[in-house]
Amino acid sequence: MSTNPVGQESWNEFSASFHGDLLRPGADTYESARKVWNGMIDRRPAAIARCKTVSDVQDALEFARENGVPVAVRGGGHNAAGLGVCDAGLVIDLSAMHDVVVDPVKRTARAGGGATWADFDRATAAHGLATTGGAVSTTGIAGLTLGGGLGWLMRSYGLACDNMIGAEVVAADGNVLRASPTENADLFWGLRGGGGNFGVVTTFEFELHAVSTVFGGMLLYPLARARDVLRMYRDVTRSAPDALTVFAAMMHSPDGLPVVALVICYNGSPEAGERAIKGFREFEKPIVDALGPMPYAALQTMLDAGFPSGLQVHWRSEFVTSIPDELIEAAVSAFEEVPSPLSAILIEQLGAAVSRVPRAGTAFDQRDSDYNLVIISRWSPHP
């Protein structure tokens, strides 16, 4: 696509005909609208098209296509890489398209491309239902699902993309396509973990599961015990039941104490959950024990405060098939020298239902990985 400058008259004509809200530089809400979750990303689009309908998305794409304007698509706006905003282009902002409609009989949900997991969980929890949906509720459903979608329920029910049963997509040529196992099956395959380059997904459809209360929370240990805690974590998770998902994290507590945390979700009763984490209980008493029965939606929001918008973030991850002692030593040694208390190193447990989906069945191909190692470098833009 060419990037020839678009004259003011063309923008004015588009603004007059566009049924959504078109924000240009100088508008009262432009500065806040161009910002994304990662404060490191500082881009100034030529315009932000806040779409309210599928027709708005089509009109925005048509204008960009006819005028050679670069396009970025913004869903929930929580993409660490900042792909939801561009310089000198048109941002197609779906944040107003966030409705979630639940069919409790069929156990399915339709969600707009701008919905967050908070929107989704609020709607499904009212019916005692849920699906795999990340670990921070401010995350958008679109970016997480299109990239695969790790979350607390993935060992029980697979990734978010495994629970997607259909989608409505506006293609680059403006046509609206239905993607499902029986309609545009190749597109459906790509949407399930292949990223966001197949079109603008305006509606997602998910399979839901009976989930209301889980046994979950957090155990905290001093960072000095990190090597032993991570070896214990490795040993326990090797034989964990499908219902148990545990993330390990080296981080700083809200009062600045360096700690290693085990964040736990057991998709079942507290009694069965206690049996599943017996190896953790036999290790040693943690400095904080915040485990207990809780609504699944509450577990989804537990880490929200630790992932606020506006911090400078450099985020990298690598899927691994094991956690050897050498990896533990390297990770702990690195974290002991971390300059910012806002940074973290995280290990996410996969396997179980995630690994039972055929590798060629979706575009997400890390089915043989047992863990995801996540390195989160963060610092405040203000001293």
Image: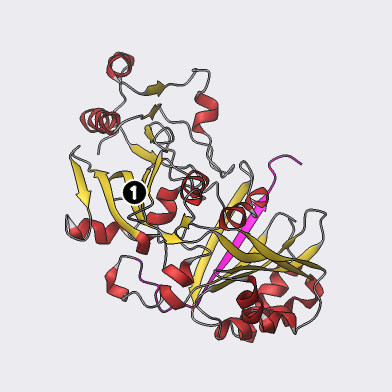
Amino acid at dot 1: Phe
Question: In this image, 330 relative to 356: left or right?
Answer: right
Towards the viewer: 212 or 279? 212
Quadrant position of the N terminus in the picture: top left
Say whether residue 382 is magenta: yes
Compared to residue 49, the image places residue 346 above or below, namely: below
Compared to residue 297, the image places residue 242 above or below, namely: below
Residue 272, picture quadrant: bottom right
Image x and y of residue 217, in percent:
67, 64
Compared to residue 49, the image places residue 305 above or below, namely: below
Please, which residue is most extreme toward the front here? 105
Image x and y of residue 39, in percent:
59, 42
Towards the viewer: 14 or 50? 50
The residue shown at (62%, 86%) is 235
Magenta-drawn segment:
364-383
The residue shown at (31%, 21%) is 19
The residue shown at (28%, 15%) is 13
Say whether residue 87 is magenta: no
Q: Secondary structure at mark 1?
A: strand
Residue under label 1, please give it. 204
Residue 366, picture quadrant: bottom left
Can residue 335 be spotted in the picture? yes
